[in-house]
Image (cartoon, rainbow, N blue to C red):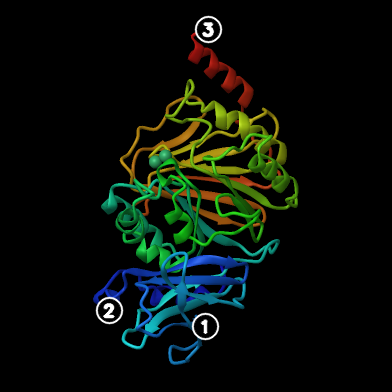
């Protein structure tokens, strides 16, 4: 079990209510460091005095906790507080207060430190653009999942990343409840357009140096996030970093990658569902360094492939989790597909040192697929990547 989540049900207050209608942007959590988080909220209004009250979830409700003043954040144009010295595997609650208003309580859990064997949970979802009610349904289902260490978003957060209002309407308002209780770790989609609003709204790790691609460690998981809208071939700056980053991961870690466009089972295809650029630039690197699972979107559906790499060797599984609200797509059909679903969905992931379990759920929380990877287990149902690519090329060129 994760941390000390004994008060989970009682503490979760997630819907926008009259009590917190004064927010123009409801409070949301973001990455700061392994032991600290940022709370953003808006409007930016310095005529009020803003603060965040933070308590351990084990405390009684009458304790004062720690009070952190909120300051102007120049990048986001919001108010911001940094909550520091947070302990791993521990549950906290917080609320924003001003001299005029008091928010409802929200809670969050801190994940284990890098290398720690404590179990934890996270969610992967994405493609939340355009249909705000559909996105809200998925986000509300995710908000009902307790104790999420973080939420991965596989890109296309909004229809038009360069339109400021789009971020409120399509992303922050539908996801407000969810974003109070778990930090979002997104990657860039084509609709996000490398917009400055993306970089201003999220505080993401600067490892190796910008927020477009990055890697992080949580307990026994190493996460690498790739930006497909700048070069990522082996000669590029990002491509060289990807190989170097993965080469340095200790062998006891689960290796997880996420980015927007999948290499296989894709509607954006150079033949039979294969996106050649992704398949040629990334898949050999994933196989070489033993990446376990890849999450992608761009296709608005759920889909899981068999392990794809070299038959008889450990090979990555590719998961499309793009049913976050955008107009739905028919899943690709072919021999590599182990499970697929056309509908609103998200993936809940539970991690222990030995097992990595992905549970795909619909927007009502009903299970639509579940599978478990076991550490050091060689899959028996894998398919050969080079054969898949060669076959697709043949069909594409009509040869
Ligand atoms: Fe897309
Ligand atoms: Fe999309």
* Above-or-below relation of 302 to 394: below
Name the residue rendered at 54%, 70% in the picture.
Answer: 37
Dot 2: within a 10 Å radius of its alpha carbon, few (fewer than 14), some, or many (20 or more) residues? few
The residue carrying mark 1 is 58
Q: Is residue 23 above or below residue 299?
A: below
- Indicate which disc residue 365 carries: none
Is the distance from the Cβ of mark 1 to the nearest ligand 2 atom less than 8 Å? no
Instruction: Confirm or reject: label 2 Cβ below 8 Å from ligand 2.
Output: no
Residue 7 located left or right of residue 114: left
Q: Alpha carbon of mark 3 to alpha carbon of mark 1: how far? A: 66 Å
- The residue closer to the viewer here, 267 or 234, is 234
Judge left or right: residue 240 versus residue 397: right
Marks 3 and 2, how far apart in space?
A: 65 Å
Q: Position of residue 132 (x, y in %)?
A: 28, 52
The structure residue drawn at horizontal position 44% and vertical position 50%, both measured from the top left corner, is 195
Q: Nearer the viewer, mark 1 or mark 2?
A: 2
341 over 277 or under it: above or below: below
Residue 128 in percent (x, y) is at: 37, 49
Seen from the viewer's position, the closer of residues 147 and 16 is 16
The residue at 68%/62% (across/down) is 114
Q: Nearer the viewer, residue 90 or 299?
A: 299
Res. 19 mark? 2
The reply to whether dot 1 and dot 2 touch (C-beta < 8 Å) is: no
Label placed on residue 399: 3
Is 36 left, or right, of 346 in this rendering? right
């Amino acid at each position: 079990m994760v941390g000390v989540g004994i008060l989970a049900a009682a503490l979760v207050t997630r819907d926008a209510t009259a009590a917190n209608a004064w927010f123009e942007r409801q409070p949301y959590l973001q990455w700061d460091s392994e032991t600290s988080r940022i709370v953003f909220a808006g409007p930016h209004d310095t005529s009020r005095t803003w603060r965040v009250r933070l308590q351990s979830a084990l405390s009684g409700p009458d304790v004062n906790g720690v009070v952190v003043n909120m300051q102007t954040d120049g990048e986001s144009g919001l108010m911001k507080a940094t909550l520091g010295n947070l302990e791993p595997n521990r549950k906290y609650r917080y609320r924003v207060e001003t001299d005029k208003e008091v928010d409802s309580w929200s809670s969050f859990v801190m994940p284990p430190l890098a290398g720690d064997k404590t179990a934890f949970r996270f969610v992967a979802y994405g493609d939340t653009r355009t249909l705000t009610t559909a996105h809200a349904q998925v986000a509300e289902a995710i908000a009902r999942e307790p104790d999420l260490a973080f939420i991965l978003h596989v890109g296309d957060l909004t229809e038009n990343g360069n339109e400021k209002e789009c971020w409120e309407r399509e992303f922050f308002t539908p996801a407000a409840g969810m974003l109070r209780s778990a930090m979002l770790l997104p990657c860039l989609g084509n609709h996000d357009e490398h917009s400055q609003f993306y970089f201003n709204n999220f505080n993401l790790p600067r490892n190796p140096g910008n927020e477009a691609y990055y890697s992080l460690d949580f307990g026994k998981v190493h996460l690498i996030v790739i930006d497909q809208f700048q070069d990522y071939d082996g000669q590029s700056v990002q491509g060289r970093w990807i190989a170097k980053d993965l080469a340095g991961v200790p062998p006891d870690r689960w290796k997880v990658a996420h980015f927007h466009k999948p290499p296989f089972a894709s509607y954006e295809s150079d033949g039979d569902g294969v996106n050649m650029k992704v398949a040629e630039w990334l898949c050999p690197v994933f196989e070489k360094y033993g990446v376990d699972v890849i999450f992608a979107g761009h296709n608005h559906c759920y889909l899981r492939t068999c392990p794809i790499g070299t038959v008889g060797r450990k090979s990555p599984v590719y998961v499309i989790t793009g049913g976050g609200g955008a107009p739905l797509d028919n899943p690709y059909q072919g021999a590599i597909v182990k499970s697929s679903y056309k509908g609103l969905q998200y993936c809940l992931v539970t991690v222990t040192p030995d097992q990595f379990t992905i549970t795909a759920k619909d927007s009502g929380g009903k299970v639509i697929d579940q599978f478990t990877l076991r550490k050091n287990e060689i899959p028996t149902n894998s398919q050969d990547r080079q054969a898949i690519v060669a076959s697709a090329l043949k069909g594409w060129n009509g040869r």
